[in-house]
Amino acid sequence: MMLKSLALLAAMALGTAASAEEMKMAVTTSFANSGLAEVLLPEIEKDTGITVQLLVVGTGQALTLGAAGDVDAVLVHSRAAEDKWLAEGNGTHRREIMYNDFVIVGPSTDPAGTKTATNATDAFKAIAAAQAPFVSRGDDSGTHKMEQALWKTAGIEPVGDWYRSVGQGMGAALNTAAGMNAYILADRASWLNFGNKADLAIDFQGDPALFNQYAYLPVNPEKYPHVKAELVEKLEDWLVSDKAKGLIEGYKIAGQQLFVFNAQPE
């Protein structure tokens, strides 16, 4: 009887595994570092039967994977890059899902005086003027693209011993900043979920220019017929559902909400 029961359980497990549908989605390291994926993925699988395999990279690499047909969808946060990607025929559409914001993290003593800046551009100017240590992700991610835009607006080409480009994801870049006691641009969610804060703190926040929108982009099945378009659509329906809204807005660290749901019905 015991052997029959075990055999039945094994058969049920195999049947469940066999019935599971899988798709690949390239997502930003900031999304993965936030911890939200660990909340959403089990619920997605439970509600839809879809196992979502995440490829965690920067926004630029995520869009490259989508353009090559190596994933079924992407979830990224750089509007200009997304619009260009869609215009090139790589995807079918863009669906906004949620947002948070970027913050300027740095030494708690704020040697550059960014806390008194009136906007993010002035905060960057203050860091450059003081030649205070600054860590850049340098990885063509959405965060890196935002950082580059801020330097450009400030009219500054960041070069010198004070500026260190690491070519890594958000978590690794934050670890480097912690070790150097340096400034860094980070998304709020990754910062709140970051364990090695050392002597770092949020030194500047609140500028509307630091708005950080995340969007879901299905890869174009006309360009890549192997793309699992039905699963992609099914996942999108879930991501804009009331269930997703509750999970996204209910996800908090130390009592702070990390994301705001803003998916709109079509």
Image (tube, rainbow, N blue to C red):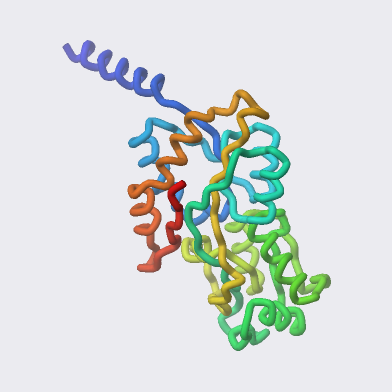
> Could you say which is closer to the camera, residue 49 or residue 263?
263
* Quadrant in which residue 198 is drawn: bottom right
Q: Position of residue 31 (x, y in %)?
A: 52, 53
Q: Could you tell me which quadrant the N terminus lies in? A: top left
Q: In the rendered image, is residue 199 in sight?
A: no
Relative side of 54 to 58, left or right: left
Q: Residue at x 36, y 52 (%)?
A: 247
Q: Residue 4, how many percent across, how many down? A: 22, 11
Q: How many dots with numbers?
A: 0
Placement of 17 over or under 67, stated as above or below = above
Percent of width and height locating residue 244:
38, 49
Image point (38%, 62%), residue name: 252
Q: Is residue 33 visible?
A: yes
Is residue 19 shown left or right of residue 229? Answer: left
Out of 161 and 42, give the one closest to the viewer: 42
127 shown above or below 229 = below
Q: Quadrant of residue 208?
A: bottom right
Instruction: Find residue 220 and report its image quarter.
Output: top right
Q: Name the residue at the left extreme.
A: 1
Q: Residue at x 54, y 76 (%)?
A: 206
Q: Is 190 located above or below residue 181 in the figure?
A: above
Give the image location of residue 230, x and y in percent. 48, 29
